[in-house]
Amino acid sequence: MSPATRLRARLESGKLLVTPSCGDALTARLIERTGFEAMFMSGFAVSASRIGAPDAGLISYGEMRDAVRDICAATRLPVMADGDTGYGNAMNVRRTVTGYMRAGAAAVMVEDQVAPKRCGHTRGKLVVDRVEAVDRIRAAADARAEEGRDVLIIARTDARHAHGLDEALARAEAFHAAGADILFVEAPHSEEEMRRICGELPGWKMANMVEGGATPILPQEILAEIGYAHAAYPLTLMAAAMQAMEQALEALRHDRPPMGLMPFAALRERVGFEDYYAAEQRYSDRREP
């Protein structure tokens, strides 16, 4: 089965799908190695790791598509990829979804923010009007149909921030009618709002667990009980990695041995040297003495 078909079947099981998020191919390898069933490609993480800039609409479609390609090439797991606003109007959305599909994405997320967009838990978010927002999802569904692939469409709305939860719910319901598979109402402020999202909307719903963000971080069993089908953790790995790197850098700057380093042998294995050596033996009669 294709990654998209496997992802759809996994969601149909009814069990909460938990996806750590990656911003590069190495992180994707680690997520797969740890035993997760899918992953999310975070635009925040890609922007930070690829161009060293905030998730504020600075990274381009081409850079994001290349990140999708590199990540999908590094893992066999389904990759749910952040398509931001689609990088323009409905025609740009079609191109974005098509490009992501051809790069290997199992799901593509499209949102209703104006361009340049913002991280969903930071200041300055604005959304396009509801008609344009729905047109983006219709364009994504059309691109999927024309490409003939079983990619899933994640429809995200950030309307809760400026227009309230009722408007966000209305948009999400319209997105479902336009062809979205997974509905993502960003930044609910309470468990009560999260319960409304799951209780009033059709189809699969996605929870975004941003540590320190506007949405409460609930245990996974509670997210499942509320009715979420998918829980993404977009910044957990990047926050852990950056904290560890800064601590190591401080130790080096003060001539102290960094603590908590992964052993070199384990590092080589995570990067893939052992797999490389095993494959290399097929093409050479030479052996190590």
Image: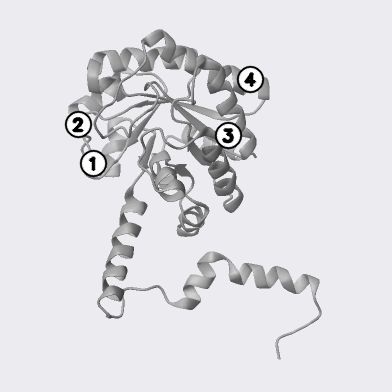
Task: Kindly identify the amino acid type of the residue bearing the numbered disc 3.
Answer: Tyr
Q: Is residue 170 left or right of residue 275?
A: left
Which callout, 3 or 1, points at the residue further toward the start of the chain? Answer: 3
Task: Kindly identify the amino acid type of the residue bearing the numbered disc 1.
Answer: Leu
The residue located at (78%, 71%) in the rendering is: 282
Which callout, 3 or 2, points at the residue further toward the start of the chain? Answer: 3
Coloration of the structure image: one colour
Which callout, 4 or 2, points at the residue further toward the start of the chain? Answer: 4
How crowded pointer 2 is (Cα within 10 Å; few <14, some 14-19, many 20+) is rated as: some
Q: Quadrant of residue 200?
A: top left
Residue 141 location in percent, x, y?
55, 19
* Element type at mark 3: helix
Whether pointer 3 and pointer 4 mark residues with C-beta atoms closer than 8 Å, the reply is no
Question: Looking at the image, can residue 259 be seen?
Answer: no
The residue located at (36%, 52%) in the rendering is: 238
Pointer 1 residue:
218
How far is mark 3 from mark 1, CA to CA? 31 Å
How crowded pointer 4 is (Cα within 10 Å; few <14, some 14-19, many 20+) is rated as: few
The residue located at (44%, 45%) in the rendering is: 46
Could you say which disc has been placed on residue 191 in the image? 2
Which callout, 1 or 4, points at the residue further toward the start of the chain? Answer: 4
Whether pointer 3 and pointer 2 mark residues with C-beta atoms closer than 8 Å, the reply is no
How crowded pointer 3 is (Cα within 10 Å; few <14, some 14-19, many 20+) is rated as: many
Whether pointer 4 and pointer 2 mark residues with C-beta atoms closer than 8 Å, the reply is no
Residue 274 location in percent, x, y?
60, 72
Pointer 3 residue:
100
User: Can you tell which of label 3 and label 1 is closer to the viewer?
Assistant: 3
Q: Quadrant of residue 98?
A: top right
How far is mark 3 from mark 4, CA to CA? 14 Å
